[in-house]
Image (tube, rainbow, N blue to C red):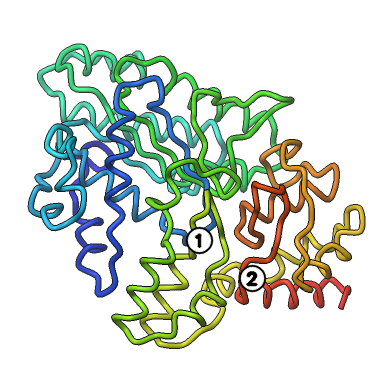
Amino acid sequence: MGIYLNPSNENFQEAVDSEIYVDKTGLIEFTNKRIKTIQQHICVIRPRRFGKSTNLAMLAAYYSKGCDSRDLFAGLSIASGESYSKHLNQYNVIYINMQQFLSDSENIDGMIALLKQSIIIDLEDEFQDVNLHTELGLIYSMERAYNAKKVPFVILIDEWDCVMREHRNDRESQKAYLDFLRNWLKDKEYVALAYMTGILPIKKFGTQSGLNMFDEYSLLSSGATGKYVDFTADEVSELCQKYEVDFEQMKAWYGGYYLNGTELYCPDSVVKAVSSKKFGGYWTEKETYEVLAKYIAMNFDGLHDTIEKLLAGQPQPVVTRTFSNDMVTFANKDNVLTLLVHLGYLGYNADDRTVYIPNKETADEFVVSMKAAGFM
């Protein structure tokens, strides 16, 4: 068991042992169907504090050969799944938070070099009986490890998009980073599953994505993952009954995100409201109104007028397909509105292609931000 290779199940154990835990192991049944298929690349896009990291810890605990998680999952819904025993703790898992490597590096080249070397060190410890020829690099070492043992890798990446957010104007570094991910993950026999999470969709240069092998699941188009990734109305209702919290107030404050007819809630805000029995801006208080105010202040195509209509409860049309999947390339109002959906400030109705303000938590943030931008 290394630092990044074949981690323990301690992080997920902490989540399960918490006073408030919602069983999301149905996600595992979904990912098991993707193992060693052409749909093995998954990218889940959600705002901050929507449960992405907890789900990654769950996947690591389930797939990692570095631990025995049978007792941990025994009482959870996945334990009755058809594929449960087949994949439990059967893979070499690489589990990384990309933000850590970026924070510890001076530039993108340094970040990539640090990541490669860190994983290679773990590979050397794990495969001491295999000549990995690590001098030839990470990809070759993983190919050697797979060829020797025939155990493929599950690669889990948290905050995949940190480079796009923190180096938002550095196109060359972004391209270098995407090239690294593509070379590492695409068309490699050693990959059984690659699962990434972030706030932004995969960056497009021109009309093409640099990582077009990934299926993306976001608040614009979640496919089948919404009920596995986010809190649903039924789950929140059960929490409210158990902890004697008013469900209608919970819905008004934190609900309002809809995907495929299912209402979804911000998990972090729900947990804090249930724990404290108080309603407030738990999610938005960590995002600071200046972030939202900056985009409102741009006032593309009269954006502040659109925000006023949204605050009045009037959904507004939006074209999402021209969004460049970054935080700086804005050609029009639609690009800004699409970004605000990904950041969680707006909901999206795929049926009529409109955006709306989903709940009181985000509505309050819009009011503060509009005032800060000088429009109210």
Q: Quadrant of residue 3?
A: top left
The front one of 348 and 142 is 348
Q: Which mark is residue 263?
A: 1
List x then y, in percent, for residue 130: 15, 16
- Amino acid type at mark 1: Glu
Q: How crowded is mark 1: few (under 14 residues within 10 Å), some or many (20 or more)?
A: some
List x then y, in percent, for residue 42: 43, 34
Identified at 77% across, 43% down, the residue is 319
Q: Residues within 10 Å of mark 2 (few under 14, many from 20)?
A: many
Residue under circle 2? 362
List x then y, in percent, for residue 14: 23, 63
Above/below status of 139 relative to 218: above
Question: Which quadrant: the N terminus?
Answer: top left
The front one of 55 and 127 is 55
Is residue 59 left or right of 376 when viewed as pictured? Answer: left
List x then y, in percent, for residue 223: 49, 41
Q: Which type of secondary structure does the marked residue at label 2 adopt? A: helix
Q: Distance between the residues labelled 2 and 1?
A: 16 Å
The front one of 252 and 173 is 252
